[in-house]
Amino acid sequence: MQEKFKEVLNYGKTLGYDVILDVNPETFKNLNINLNKLDLSYFNQLGATTLRLDGNFDGLTEALLSTNNDNIKIQLNASLMNKTISNIISYGANPLNLSALHNFYPQEYSGLDQDLFNFFSKKWRSFGIKLGVFITLDGAAQTGPWDINDNLPTLESHRYLPLDLQLRHFLAIQYFDFILISTQFATEEQLKCLRDNNFNLLTFKVQLDKDITSLEKEILLKHDHYIRGDLSAFIARSTVPRKTYLNDSVPPRDFLHKYFQPGDIVMPNDKYLKYKGEVQIVRKQIKNDGRRNYFGKLPSSDCILLDFIKPWRAFKIIEVK
């Protein structure tokens, strides 16, 4: 069994994978490994590149392990923040050999709250520690390491969200350095969907109105956008397009509703004179006075991204087919 395990792990290394083993104090005890000797050659030979330390260590042990001579990285549990990282650093740990990874949570309703996630993550990153998170596949075909699997997210709010929205939400939050998929097996289509995301932009998917013109669609989907620094509570404005398309007409189009709602995408039309051509994301309900054209709306699940609209932040809009 051990030889088979070794074969699989080393094959993973040849493919460029970071092979992470979850270990605790009992693991070292059962393998008769003396932590005081800092000898991790067993795991090196097995094919591991990183040991994720779970369970109760004392701070000094983690610090010493981070200085091992076997080229094994040490990963810490990011979801149980107390004074752990402060203690480890105070014992002279090598921060370049450390990373941290949040838990995944098999039990429904047990995942991290976003505010607590933000608090933990800011703390880890303040020490210069690279931080990882989990996203999860949703559906009967997914497989995880536990016999109870209500999906395996880090954030409870992600438990039943589409895979790419979980990624885009984490990209919006920004407090992470790497992402792992906690359940298997992702399809080629799902992996491509993740790869196709722009990791540097806040990305919204939009259900476009059937009457949108080709010019409006070009401005919305192909132009670069960023949010003006003087952000309003009601709308987020991308104003550069109005200069790019200064000489183009944006004729008014009818919109039957009295108000635009949060998550609607609109554009000032010719009636709004010099403001014509701006792309605007509605944050709070605003009245429809005929001077804005309706482009479409975010799917309801994507509205969680509205909280991450910030001054000067670049963003991208993708059409939902």
Image (cartoon, rainbow, N blue to C red):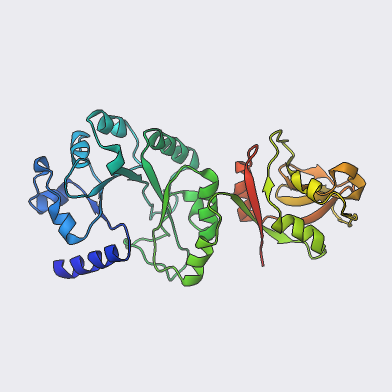
Pick the residue in front: 127 or 118: 127
Specify the farthest residue to the right.
Answer: 271
Q: Residue furthest top?
A: 90
Instruction: Say above or below: 162 vs 272.
Output: below
Q: In screen coordinates, is 211 left or right of 155? A: right
- Is residue 212 at all visible to an observer of this figure? no
**Viewer-side residue, 320 vs 141:** 320
Residue drawn at the location 23% of the way across and 44% of the way down: 55
Q: Position of residue 236 (x, y in %)?
A: 71, 42
Left/right placement of residue 54 relative to residue 203 reads left
Q: Quadrant of residue 87?
A: top left
Q: Where is residue 217 drawn, in percent x and y?
A: 76, 60
Residue at the spot 61% in from the left edge and 42% down from the top edge:
307
305 to the left or right of 21: right
Q: Residue at point 89% right, 44% down?
A: 272
Task: Tally the marks.
Answer: 0
Q: Is residue 136 above or below residue 234?
A: below
Q: Nearer the viewer, residue 111 or 109?
A: 111
Residue 266: percent from left, percent from top: 78, 51
User: In this orientation, does residue 108 appear?
Assistant: yes
Q: Where's the C terminus, which quadrant? A: bottom right
Q: Is residue 112 left or right of residue 26?
A: right
Quadrant placement of the N terminus: bottom left
Residue at 44% x, 68% y is: 186
